Image: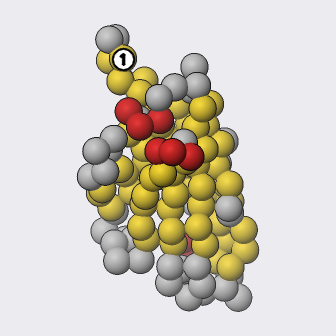
Amino acid sequence: QVQVAESGGGLVQPGGSLRLSCAASGGIFSRFAMGWYRQAPGKQRELVATITSGGVTNYADSVKDRFTISRDNAKNTGYLQMNSLKPEDTAVYYCKITQTSWSGPEDYWGEGTLVTVSS
């Protein structure tokens, strides 16, 4: 069983920056794929960014050139650096860890961390 915990959310002014962290335990972190998702009030959860075990990244168009996903396998932690934040980035941000086993991919979610962008 993989445990996932996000941290780093908070209140930030428009144009500001935040770095979210995703700590995972209970497996071999370097073999995990990781993704950040977000859910704004009244909206469905949406993909923000993903990174494979090999370091290949993918971003939603709305965050390209502003957000950067990364991972530190030695620390069993992934990150989402968010710059030039906008009010529309306000949401609960979730980390998803995907572990691929003999039975197929298994997803594990954290409980989320709230990011509020407001002046």
Residue 78, percent across and down?
51, 51
Q: In the picture, residue 89 is in which quadrant?
A: bottom right
Q: Amino acid at mark 1?
A: Ser
Q: Residue at x 68, y 63 (%)?
A: 9
Tell me if 95 is positioned left or right of 10 in this view.
left
Count of residue discs: 1
Q: In the picture, residue 41 is in which quadrant?
A: bottom right
Quarter of the image with the N terminus is: top right
Asked whether residue 31 appears in the rendered view, the answer is yes
Q: How is the image coloured?
A: secondary structure
Disc 1 crowd rating (10 Å Cα; few below 14, some 14-19, many 20+) is few
Residue 88, percent across and down?
53, 74
Q: Residue at x 58, y 25 (%)?
A: 26
The image shows residue 56, relative to residue 117, as above or below, that is above
The image shows residue 29, relative to residue 58, as above or below, that is above
Which element is circle 1 on? strand
Q: Judge by depth and name the residue closer to the eye, 115 or 98.
A: 98
Q: Residue at x 31, y 68 (%)?
A: 61
Going by the picture, which residue comes out furthest to the front? Answer: 74
Residue 75, percent across and down?
56, 46
Tell me if 45 is positioned left or right of 12 in this view.
left
Q: In the picture, residue 93 is in which quadrant?
A: bottom right
The image shows residue 88, relative to residue 7, as above or below, that is below
Q: Residue at x 43, y 44 (%)?
A: 34
Quarter of the image with the C terminus is: bottom right
Asked whether residue 95 appears in the rendered view, the answer is no
Q: Which residue is mark 1?
A: 101
Q: Judge by depth and name the residue closer to the eye, 109 or 86.
A: 109
Q: Judge by depth and name the residue closer to the eye, 113 or 20.
A: 20
Q: Judge by depth and name the residue closer to the eye, 17 or 119.
A: 17
Residue 32, percent across and down?
41, 35
